[in-house]
Amino acid sequence: MSDNKAPTGDDAVTVEIEIAAPPERVFQALVDQKQLIAWWGSEPSTNLVAFDMDARKGGQYRYACVARTGHDHSEVGEQMKKTGANTFECHGEVLELDPPRLAVWSWIANWHDDAARRTIVRWELEPTKTGTRVRVTHSGLAGMPVSRKDYSKGWVGVLDLLHKFITGLHEEAHGHSQHSV
C-alpha cells in the first residue's frame, strides 16, 4: 500500500528519540502485548483499560483508556464531550512488520476530528553507536488540526514512556544506569 510509506507532505508529525538499548529490545516493546500494557499504561493522564495486539502483518490491535481525574485533555477532551465518548479508543491493523527495524499500523481513533478516518503510524528503528534511534511518524493528519496539534505533543510523551520502560529494564538487567539522549 502506498500510504504505508513515509509521508512527504505536511500532513504528518514526526518525533525521534535515542534509547540506550539494541533495536531488537525496542522492537519487542512495540509488538509484545504485555510490554505494551506495561509502558503505554504508565501514561499519567489516563488509565489504560485494554491493549490487545496481534503482532503480525494483517493482525489487529486495539487499546482503550479513560482520563484520570484532574488531567485536562484540552481540545481533544472537548471533541470527546461532543461525541459523548468517555473512553479514548484506538484500533487498527498491523500493515508492515520488519523486525527489528520497522512496524507500521493503521490508526483509527475516536478522538479524531473524523473518528472513522484511518491514519498511519510508522515506527522506524535504526541502530546507533549507543543504542537505537526511534522515529515515529504519524501521517494522514492533513485537515485534522486538533489531532495534529495533539499528536505533536502526544508522541513526545509516548516516546518518553517507551524510553523510561526500556532503560528501566536495561538498568535492572545490568545493575547500572545507562544514559541516553
Image: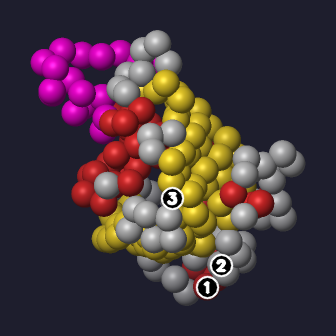
Label 2 Cα neighbours within 10 Å, binned few <14 / some 14-19 / many ≥20: few
Q: Is residue 153 above or below residue 3?
A: above
- Residue type at mark 1? Thr
Is 147 rendered above or below residue 135? below
Q: Is 41 on the left or on the right of 3, as rendered?
A: left
Q: Is 40 covered by the magenta stretch?
A: no
**What is the CA distance from the residue labelled 3 to the residue labelled 1?**
17 Å
Closest to the observer: 180 or 92? Answer: 92
Q: Position of residue 60 (x, y in %)?
A: 46, 73
Q: Position of residue 45 (x, y in %)?
A: 41, 55
Residue at figure coordinates x 49%, y 24% from the top left: 127
- Which mark identifies residue 150? none
Give whichever of 44, 139 is nearer the camera.
Answer: 139
Is the residue under label 2 in contact with that under label 3 (CB below 8 Å)? no
Circle 2: residue type: Ala
Provide the residue span drawn in magenta. Answer: 165-181
Of mark 2 and mark 1, the one earlier in the sequence is 1
Q: Residue at x 16, y 20 (%)?
A: 174
User: Mark 3 or mark 2, which has the lower sequence index?
Assistant: 3
Specify the label residue 115 is tagged with.
Answer: 2
The numbered disc on residue 83 is 1
Q: Is residue 166 magenta?
A: yes
Q: Residue at x 30, y 16 (%)?
A: 178
Q: Quadrant of the N terminus?
A: bottom right
Element at label 1: helix
Find disc 3 in the rendering and name its residue: 72
Which of the two discs, 2 and 1, sits closer to the camera? 2
Element under disc 3: loop
**Residue 76 image point, x, y percent:** 61, 65
Closer to the camera in the image, 106 or 152:
106
